[in-house]
Image: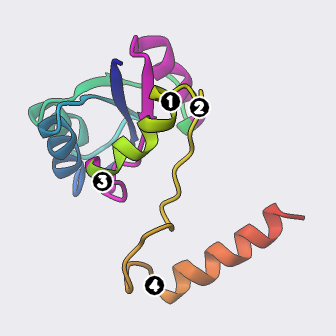
Amino acid sequence: MKTCILIPTLNEEKNIGDVVEKFVENGFKVVVIDGHSTDRTREIAESKGAEVILQSGKGKGQAIKEAFNYIDSDVVIMIDGDGTYLPEEVDRLLKPIEKGYAEHVIGNRFANYEKGAFTRLNLIGNKILNFFFRL
């Protein structure tokens, strides 16, 4: 099953190199679609092995739409460029698809986070946003 890691980016210079490198080392094709970063995001991603697309429109939704028109893989795993998601967790996402149990899988970055990974402000903000989304 041909799998691609999709990373929409905007000014992710600080982390994108490590993120791309880890996924490439684990054998994944990595596509970065960049929303006109003003830093070195594109250059760093490309130097670490990613295919880089310069987004023509604006916003993350537009980036995803453009990327899906470009990518020809059977499965696309979309992650953030900040290092939140680990390559070791991809198999857990792929398993239900490979076994035919699901066509779409959504990960949860809060499932196994380590103590101290989020600030108190992050946790409070997430609770408030979740409350309003459930209304």
Disc 1 target residue: 97
Q: Residues within 10 Å of mark 1 (few under 14, many from 20)?
A: some
Q: Is residue 99 left or right of residue 45?
A: right
Compute the Cα span from label 3 to label 1: 19 Å
Q: Position of residue 34 (x, y in %)?
A: 37, 33
Q: Residues within 10 Å of mark 3 (few under 14, many from 20)?
A: few
Q: Residue at x 54, y 85 (%)?
A: 121
Disc 2 target residue: 101
Q: Earlier in the sequence, mark 3 or mark 1?
A: 3
Compute the Cα span from label 3 to label 4: 20 Å
**Pointer 1 and pointer 2: residues touching (CB < 8 Å)?**
yes
Front residue of 88/54: it is: 88
Compute the Cα span from label 3 to label 2: 23 Å
Q: Residue at x 44, y 24 (%)?
A: 75
Q: Looking at the image, is mark 3 or mark 2 nearer the viewer?
A: 2
Q: Earlier in the sequence, mark 2 or mark 4?
A: 2
Disc 3 target residue: 86
Q: Residues within 10 Å of mark 4 (few under 14, many from 20)?
A: few
**Local SS, label 4:** loop
The picture quadrant where one finds residue 9 is top left
Q: Residue at x 16, y 51 (%)?
A: 18
Q: Vertically, is 12 above or below 63?
A: below
Q: Quadrant of the C terminus?
A: bottom right
Q: Position of residue 80 (x, y in %)?
A: 40, 48
